[in-house]
Amino acid sequence: MYLLLLLHFLLPPPNDPPAGLFFHFKGRPYALTRPMRPGPESYLPRGRFDEHQLDTMSNRFDSRRNHVEIIRQDDGKRPRFGVALAFEFDEENGEYPYTPAYAMLQLKDFGWGGVEFDARDTCNYTGVSNAVSDDLFIEIDDYRNDTIFGRFSGLLLSGAGGMATLDSGYFAIRVYRVR
């Protein structure tokens, strides 16, 4: 018994993926590891937010609504690419892998202008999974120590009418509880 306890503390933890959102889109790999950050020329949502507020917005878990929102960018202050990922998550489920009842992913190329993800945005891509549409596949592999681990892929649609495949996506994101 003592030997097992000692081994538990001496052995390294299982190999978790690195923190962030990782995927391939249009044949190119992306590693989005940074949340939003304030700065003199930052791309931020409307309003003035400090670093703590932006951290919460980038890593949000509303346990009352069973809803997770994650925002990751290639650069916190001057991003070129960003992703907003939202999905239903029931932490009491306890069985993994877990497939959310709904999910939404928006891929933003900040080079096309505009700061916020917007329905009128015709140069960026969106995927949805719900009772009506099944463009996006997302599966939660684990949830421990306030970190969500998962995989995703899908066929994303542009407001201009184009489609593109997002594949080999995975994430490991520490989330903050909000109520």
Image: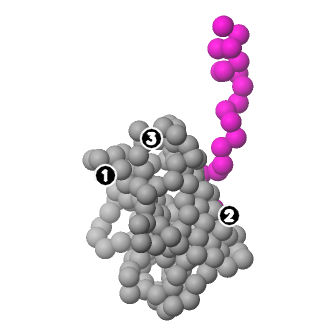
**Residue under the image location 67 percent in, 79 percent down:** 26
Kindly identify the amino acid type of the residue bearing the numbered disc 1: Arg
Viewer-side residue, 176 vs 154: 154
- Does the rendering let one see residue 77? no
Q: To which residue does mark 1 refer?
A: 65
Earlier in the chain: of badge 2 and badge 1, it is: 1
Q: Is residue 18 magenta?
A: yes
Q: Is residue 121 above or below residue 56?
A: below
* Type of the residue with mark 3: Asn
Q: Position of residue 94 (x, y in %)?
A: 48, 37
Label 2: few (<14), some (14–19) or many (≥20) C-alpha neighbours in 10 Å: few
Dots 2 and 1: beta carbons under 8 Å?
no
Determine the CA span between mark 2 and mark 1. 28 Å
Query: Which of the two labelled residues, at mark 3 and mark 2, occupies the earlier sequence position?
Result: 3
Q: Residue at x 52, y 82 (%)?
A: 157
Pinpoint residue 34: horizontal percent, then vertical percent.
Answer: 54, 60
Residues drawn in magenta: 1-22
Label 3 to label 1: alpha-carbon separation = 14 Å
Helix, strand, or loop for circle 2?
strand
Image-based side of 145 in relation to 32, left or right = left
Q: Residues within 10 Å of mark 1 (few under 14, many from 20)?
A: few
Q: Residues within 10 Å of mark 3 (few under 14, many from 20)?
A: few
- Relative horizontal placement of residue 176, taking residue 158 as reference (left or right): left
The residue sitting at 63% across, 76% down in the picture is 165
Q: Secondary structure at mark 1?
A: loop
Comparing marks 3 and 1, which lies closer to the viewer? 3
**Residue 143 location, x and y as percent?**
51, 42
Structural distance between the alpha carbons of marks 3 and 2: 25 Å
Give the residue pinned by disc 2.
Answer: 168
Secondary element type, mark 3: loop
Residue at the disc numbered 3: 93
